[in-house]
Amino acid sequence: MDPVVIPILVATIVVVFLVASTVRIVPQARRYNIERFGRYRRTLQPGLNFVVPVADRVNTKLDVREQVYSSDPKPVITEDNLVVNIDTVLYYQITDPRAAAYEVADFLQAIDQLTVTTLRNVIGSMDLEGTLTSREEINARLRTVLDDATGKWGIRVNRVEIKAIDPPHTIKEAMEKQMRAERDKRAAILHAEGERQAKILTAEGTKQKDILEAQGTQQAMILRADGEAKAVELVFQAVHRNNADPKILAYKYLETLPHLAKSDNNTFWVIPGELTEAVRAVTSAFGDQSTMGLPASAQPEGTTTADADDASDEGGAAELEAGSSLSLDAAAAADEVAKQAAAVVSDAKAEAEAARAPQVPGRGQTSGD
């Protein structure tokens, strides 16, 4: 082999190595920290970069995208001396690659330990119920503390979330019993409220029904009373317009009595006190008609004033006989009317017969005398 070729090959290899050492290609969302002779020089940005061969070297390669870090469950003691295990999830992003590489040795471990200590400080001032119901407050306080502490490390904490809070098993059972009791209580309250509302609605409906029925009955009674009043008024006007005789009215009164006992539901009925007056009016009516029916020529023509004194006794006897005959006609008319009334009312008939029986013989005795 030619001795000249070997140096050329060696030189070529050295040149290729130097060129390869000079070029650095950085991917997107990556940052490379460059040290020159062990001292930080600069941070390479994504793309094609050139460095000094042999003198410059890449110390750390960092990902500047937002990343998620989930810590292991950590025991924390609450204010009421209960031990709970809390898992946290951390969302962070590297904003300064130089500080993340040179200000802290292991930023993930530092963030984890800072999260645990902050959780113990925050949870230690809360009881178990407050811990379970105050996640937003705990997250906000954690983020504030971590963001202040990690700012100088070139890291920005975007979010801190509590993934799980696990109380002891006995506390879980007690909480389940409490929740079951609360649900039973709510169910009983809701059931009672439903029954109460149903009873109220039923009472309101019954009240409205009674009110409407009472109003309907009232309107019906008012209309019935108005109709009866108008009917009475019409009858009264007709009576006065036709100038009816009281004797006719008395007769109509007696005619109406039989209709009072036609109903099958009537077990007893009362005889009005005006029955005697009505009978007396009808009797007098028939008596007046009998008197009015006598002609004026019924007196004998042979009677003179000269013989008046001589025949005074005979005239008295004649008047008694005429009066007794008129009374007999009136009694017959009253008997006819009383018979019509007694067809329905047996008690009224007995009283009428008892009242009429002594009158007729008395008049007959007067006439006989």
Image: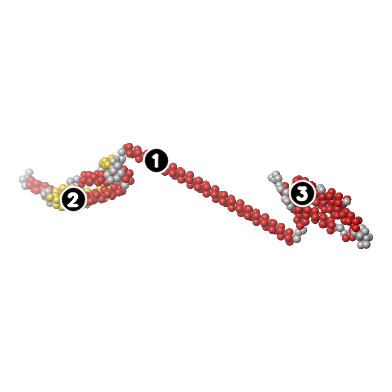
Tag 1: Cα neighbours inside 10 Å, few (<14), some, or many (≥20)? few
Location of the N terminus (image quadrant)? top left
- Counting the numbered discs, the total is 3
The amino acid at mark 3 is Ala
Q: Which residue is mark 1?
A: 181
Of residue 285 and residue 2, the one placed in the foreground of this image is 285
Label 3 to label 2: alpha-carbon separation: 132 Å
Disc 3 or 1, which lies upstream in sequence? Answer: 1
Of residue 284 and residue 121, the one placed in the foreground of this image is 284
Instruction: Return the residue found at the far left.
Output: 3
Disc 3 or 2, which lies upstream in sequence? Answer: 2
Q: Residue at x 74, y 52 (%)?
A: 274
SS type, badge 3: helix
Please say if 241 is above or below 67. below
Tag 2: Cα neighbours inside 10 Å, few (<14), some, or many (≥20)? some
Q: Position of residue 4 (x, y in %)?
A: 6, 47
Q: Which residue is mark 2?
A: 99
Report the side of 16 relative to 172 (left or right): left
Label 2 to label 1: alpha-carbon separation: 55 Å
SS type, badge 2: helix
Q: Residue at x 24, y 50 (%)?
A: 147
Tag 3: Cα neighbours inside 10 Å, few (<14), some, or many (≥20)? many
Q: Residue at x 11, y 47 (%)?
A: 13
The amino acid at mark 2 is Ala
Proximity of marks 3 and 1: CB atoms separated by less than 8 Å: no
Report the side of 36 relative to 280 (left or right): left
Label 3 to label 1: alpha-carbon separation: 85 Å
Q: Which mark is residue 341?
A: 3
Q: Which mark is residue 27?
A: none
